[in-house]
Image (tube, rainbow, N blue to C red):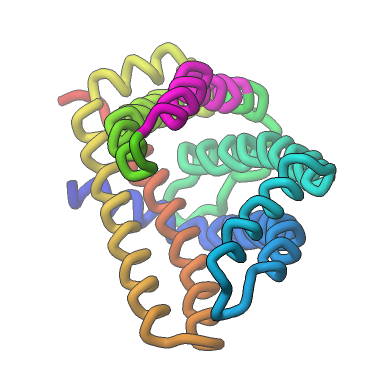
Amino acid sequence: MKKWMGQGWNITVRHKYVWVLLFIYRFLWGFFLFRLVDSVVTPVLLRYPDLHPNADAVPLFLIEAEFRLLRTDLVDDLLWLLTGLLLVRMVLTPLLNAGVYYSFHHTSGEGGTHVWSGIRNAWKPVTLLYWLENALALLPAVWLLPMAKDRLMSAVSPVHWLQELLLYAVGWLVYGFVLHVLFQSMQFGAVTREGWAKGALRAYFRALPLVTVSLVMIGIGFAASAAVTAVSLVWSGLAAVIVHQAFQFVRALLSLWTAAAQFSVWRETES
């Protein structure tokens, strides 16, 4: 475990500018997404009753908010912009993956990275695999969302409804996690020219260490996120904003380190 995480860290250190690129990419995505949602949510929240509303004020506010969001064209532009942003993300993310994974494979010693070469040489198979992964990850929603809607109508309370759906949500998360590890290994196979089938086969034989390393890195990420959240609760105002934005650097680093550690596990042959 330490060996793979150490190898992943060494690879990460050699990709410092990729770390900065990932930070900028995540920051811009989060910024534009926040501004879009804020442009719709804030005008609705400004209509919320004062601190001492009468008994009918809050229900009337909820009815008005539902009407404005669902019965008017208020969110139409937002949905179109969100769709556009999602399409841009669906194009840019696999390009970055292709460049980074290719560079993981070809970077050694003190030499430079090969991200741009990876984008040129491996973007097609990586993009195809990325889109297929996302399509399969969303496939359960075709059944789960209508089921959740039906159960909501017959649920005793929202809490009871959430409890009923908890097991399905956990199963969906596990399914998405396994799918991601498998398709990431197939992308590794694509950038190393071994082929996606051999990449999947390697993932099968290295399943236990791959999953273990992935879960350890996820645990580190959750711990760091919990620490930042705790600090934000203690330090309010500008300090909390600064800490939160600085943490985006850490998130980008952990994301790159996780992929590098997973690649280190995947490329190691069976003894």
Give the image location of residue 197, x and y in percent: 43, 12
- The residue located at (67%, 41%) in the rendering is 89
234 above or below 82?
below
Left or right: where 244 falls relative to 206: right
Residue 203: x %, y % from top left: 32, 23
Identity of the residue furthest to the front in this view: 55
Q: How many marks?
A: 0
Whether the magenta-drawn stretch holds residue 146 is answered as: yes
Examine the rendering and report whether any part of residue 271 can be seen: yes
Depth check: give the residue in front, 1 or 161: 161
**Would you say the magenta stretch is mainly helix, strand or loop?**
helix
What residue span does the magenta drawing correspond to?
Answer: 128-155
Residue 42, picture quadrant: bottom right
Q: For the point 37% across and 85% down, which residue is it?
A: 234
Q: Is residue 125 left or right of residue 6?
A: right
**Residue 88 rendering spot, x and y as whole percentages:** 74, 40
* Figure check: 66 above or below 229: above
